[in-house]
Image (cartoon, rainbow, N blue to C red):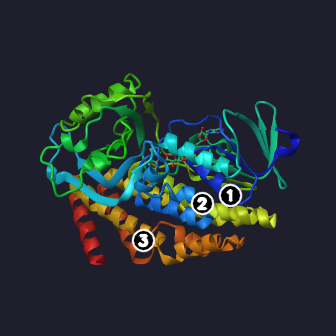
Amino acid sequence: MENSTKQFDVIILGSGISGSTLATILAKHQVRVLIIDKGTHPRFAIGEALTSHTEKLFSLLSHQYGIPEFDHLSSFHKINKHLKNCGCGYKRSFGFLYHQEGKEQLPQERIQWGTGHDSHLFRQEIDHYLLKTANNYGAKFLCETTVSDIKIDASKVEVKLESGEQFTADYLVDASGYNSILAEKLNLREKPTRFKTHSRSIFTHMIGVKNTDDCLKETNANIMPFYQGTVHHIFDGGWMWVIPFNNHENSSNPICSVGLNLDPRRFPKNNNLSPDQEFKHFISLFPSIPLQFENAKPVRNWVATDRLQYSSSSCVGERFYILPHATGAIDAIFSVGVAQTFITISPLAALILKAIANKDFTTKNFASLGRLQQDIFDYNDKIANCTYISFRNFNLMNAWLRVWLLQHMMSVAKLSSTRLLGLALETHKGYKDRDWSRFTNIDYLKDIDPRTEGWGNSYVQKAILEVEKVEQNLLSADEAAINIISLLNSTS
Ligand SMILES: Cc1cc2nc3c(=O)[nH]c(=O)nc-3n(C[C@H](O)[C@H](O)[C@H](O)COP(=O)(O)OP(=O)(O)OC[C@H]3O[C@@H](n4cnc5c(N)ncnc54)[C@H](O)[C@@H]3O)c2cc1C
């Protein structure tokens, strides 16, 4: 690049779903954006199961910033219409199959709830699509590029590359995920993490995974097929995801995403076993699972993680913001990762646009959003921790999943409220209005916060306490289940 093109308004580190989404919004609004990634596209990424909440957020971002390409990702059918052959799967439900060691899975220990016409994102295609969209709106992209140094002072950000090239910008966003450059450089990682959830994961993409329903004894014709959704095989101490991409007449990608999540305090990593061996050993303990994987073969190397949870003491500072996946992570359960990212991006993009317009990047303007991001992590952590505790007993899991579902439905309803979409639509229509303050004030942050308020928050908090008492041996799992169900009945 010429020297004159080395000055940007914003530099984004990482071109995954979060970096490219933010870059698209900023570039669309005439911000000079540079994205730097150490890798390239298309490339494998995890985070494939969506919820109705995530889909609504795609829609919200589309209306808020006038970007139709986001709305194309807001349902399975829209994806099929606008992104032909992108390999995504269909999600009509969350399905939970409870297993006990050495025993056949029981039909009465199955739980399912419907979602909208949601999707399983084939991330390598979707991330690439979003990067190309950012590019089309004018964002510059450097791939396979290593950052060697970052300097931030009161007046600017300087990013130096291993090649010796140097770029300056007014603001820096770290979207580089687990290996966050800024968290490392500024020593922000909490060691040990403050999160309570304990899990590790092994995961891969497979072909030849059988349709879940074909492997179940006594299926019920009155419920939706499990295979047209995200399947969770649950057992005491962990769970497995099965995320098919070939589960609809319009989705023919033969790949199925498979992941095994274990509490390492119960099931420590055994370095003498390969992930494939560990996976096969584990499923052999549960007589109803192996049939589904009888002919399955991994099509890429397994990834075996250490403890998944990591956290940072801060995500905001002078002239920088660290996006959620670079700040911390909890667990794949309930697929909240991408949603959390979009909850941040919705107000963050407006904050950056406002900062550029006012030439004022004062940290305190971003501080409320940083607090919200950290609070959502703590909330999601409590929920995930309780979920793992609940897995020790079907009745407790059954009661607890209802709590999760109710709070999820309330967060979707909140997001669909006329106030939030109304604000976004108003901007979408007019477009002349460059006053982003409506999306940056405290009320907007309250609206986008997925946590329940008032009585909703009160029952969630009470239910959390009931489940935590089980872990502390103050209550049996069955007693906690009864208490939670009566709590739910008393709120209706
Ligand atoms: C096991 C697991 C399962 C999950 N399942 C789900 C799910 O089902 N649903 C869901 O919503 N969420 C899920 N999540 C969370 C989800 O994966 C993340 O929220 C999401 O992928 C974050 O996207 P991102 O763009 O911020 O980060 P990433 O997708 O991690 O992208 C980071 C980018 O930064 C680049 N990068 C890294 N280091 C550097 C560097 N030094 N310099 C430049 N670039 C760099 C990488 O190459 C990459 O392109 C899961 C997470 C895990 C760990």
Secondary element type, mark 1? helix
Q: Residue 60's spot in the image, x, y percent?
A: 53, 65
Q: What residue do we see at 53% from left, 68% from top?
A: 448
Of pointers 3 and 2, the one earlier in the residue sequence: 2
> Which residue corresponds to mark 2?
67
Task: Please state which of the two labelled residues, at mark 1 or mark 3, is closer to the viewer.
Answer: 1
Direction from residue 113 to residue 173 in the image, left or right? right
Q: List the residue tagged with mark 1.
A: 28
391 left or right, relative to 443: left
**Label pair 1/3, CB-CB below 8 angstroms:** no
Q: Which amino acid does the dot numbered 3 rest on?
A: Ala
On the image, the x and y values in percent for residue 449 come to 52, 67
> Mark 2 is on which residue type?
Ile
* Residue 78 can be seen in this image: yes
First in sequence, mark 1 or 3: give its number.
Answer: 1
x%, y% of residue 138? Answer: 71, 50
Q: Quadrant of residue 158?
A: top right
In this rendering, would 369 be left or right of 33? left
Q: Quadrant of residue 113?
A: bottom left
What x and y, as percent, mark residue 147?
Answer: 72, 36
Which mark sits nearer the N-terminus, 1 or 2?
1
Kindly identify the amino acid type of the residue bearing the numbered disc 1: Lys
Q: Quadrant of the N terminus?
A: top right
User: How far separated are the C-alphas under marks 1 and 2?
Assistant: 8 Å
Give the residue number, with chain letter if any, for mark 3.
413
Examine the rendered structure and indicate whether residue 274 appears above or below residue 438: above
Q: Residues within 10 Å of mark 1 (few under 14, many from 20)?
A: many
Q: How many marks?
A: 3
